[in-house]
Image: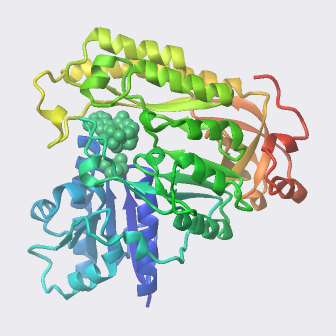
Amino acid sequence: MAKKLFVKTYGCQMNVYDSARMADVMAPHGYEPIDTVEGADLVILNTCHIREKATEKVYSELGRLRQNKDQAAREGRRMLIGVAGCVAQAEGDEIVRRAPMVDLVFGPQTYHRLPEMVVRALDRTGGRGAGVVDTDFPAEDKFDFLPEESAERGASAFLSIQEGCDKFCTFCVVPYTRGAEFSRPARAVLDEARRMIANGASEITLLGQNVNAYHGAGLDDRDWGLGRLIRHLAELPGLERIRYTTSHPRDMDADLIAAHGEVPALMPFLHLPVQSGSDRVLEAMNRKHSADDFRRIVDRLRAVRPDLALSSDFIVGFPGEGDAEFVETLRLIREVTFAQAYSFKYSARPGTPAASVEDQIPDQVKSDRLQALQQILNAQQVAFNRSKIGSVQPVLFDRKSHKPGQLIGRGPWMQSVHAEAPERLLGHLIDVRIEDGHANSLSGTVLRHDPDASEIRQTGLPPSVTHPLPPAAE
Ligand code: SAH
Ligand code: SF4
Ligand code: F3S
């Protein structure tokens, strides 16, 4: 009988990608993915260490899982619990000490060894004592060991092209949990993209902790930057949309910026974290760019792609951030304007340089600043969403709504778009007239869905060329 695998994912899209690969690695060993804990033979928490809250969530989830494990034992079944991802990498066997029912601990660079770890864990007699811990940064490349065959299906796919980070922002754990920067060769990326397209993907989001630092071996044996890779991906038949995340302002090079103006498949939405609008804080964060550098990059992007919408990340209450510095962040937000953003209170992470700085900011001040900042960002988001009312957007329907008869998809600017639509439109790019804009989504009416329309798009013409109606003024 097939064994059941349940993977619960926390954190960033890199973890989403890794979780899907864990399922692929276990599939040849008879493990079938399920989406609840009940009945699972192997439960994996793929964890995030970025902020204290993220880490704490893992330990409370482990508390709950303990009951499931005990219940399974009462029913005469063995349920293995694995902790993967960035908490596993950062805390290693400390996890087994704190939560002895954990059988496996493994990091983001060792999950290709999961089948042998499971065998070793099953061989262990009792449920107590040290579990199987594998948090190396191995010399071998896990991508060389991952199966090509993937069970993943869907119109929109994630493709990991770069991992790790050498930037060492003083607040961040990623360089420690994910290790040194590494780019996959262009051939491996293009092959995986082709397989994803064959499995139904028409949108691919390229992933990396520092995706635009990409410098993989190209098809001509020279190193390619992200701009070059995107131009090649754009030529793959059937690939209609390309996105990438997460980028660092320092790595927005001229070729990548130019690609935004020249590659129609590259979507007009970019997540570009700035963290702060104060040069003094940016310096203390070791971001290696100024607030004006960020403004200039945005200007250059918008010069080649005027409809580009931006998303960003902000940290408030970084050690030493005074009121004047915080106000500079608000000024930057007002000037640049964002379609969407994530903002966080600074969280001191063990082992990072900023955590041991004296000048920590009281939590109440952080909360007040976060609220003030989010008020502006939310207003900008609603204004951006409402600015789309009356326009016609190609929407890639990728899921059913809980409302019967409705589908949900994404427009070019990443907003979720809800519309009445028959299920057969799932996986298709369909023109939708936007009728309403809300805080977190848009709603509209499907204009037409003749199969010919998507065929026209597959010739690589920009989506706007095939619009029967010109987009309304925005
Ligand atoms: N590689 C990306 C960010 C990855 S982490 C980049 O360079 O921008 C995602 C976001 O989490 C960061 O952009 C930052 O805003 C936030 N973050 C990271 N460490 C944090 C910390 N210690 N406290 C609060 N927010 C943090
Ligand atoms: Fe963390 Fe900075 Fe690297 Fe982003 S660039 S992952 S914030 S260290
Ligand atoms: Fe979290 Fe690790 Fe991603 S710390 S944000 S899961 S790289």
Q: Residue 19 appears in which quarter of the rendering? A: bottom left
Judge by depth and name the residue closer to the eye, 148 or 371: 148
Q: Is residue 401 visible?
A: no
Please determine whether, in this image, residue 322 is positioned above or below residue 260: above
- Find residue 149 and report its horizontal and vertical position in percent: 54, 78
Ligand 1's quadrant: top left
Q: Going 52% across and 49% down the picture, which residue do you hit?
A: 225
Residue 215 vs 140, above or below: the answer is above
**249 left or right, relative to 355:** right
Q: In which image quadrant can residue 167 be found?
A: top left
Q: Nearer the viewer, residue 420 or 183?
A: 183
Quarter of the picture containing the C terminus is: top right
| Residue 358 higher or lower than 182, as above or below | above
* Position of residue 62 measured from the top left corner of the image (x, y, whole percent): 24, 60
Q: Residue 237 appears at what percent x and percent y?
A: 74, 62
- Classify residue 294 as left or right of residue 395: left
Image-based side of 463 in relation to 44, left or right: right
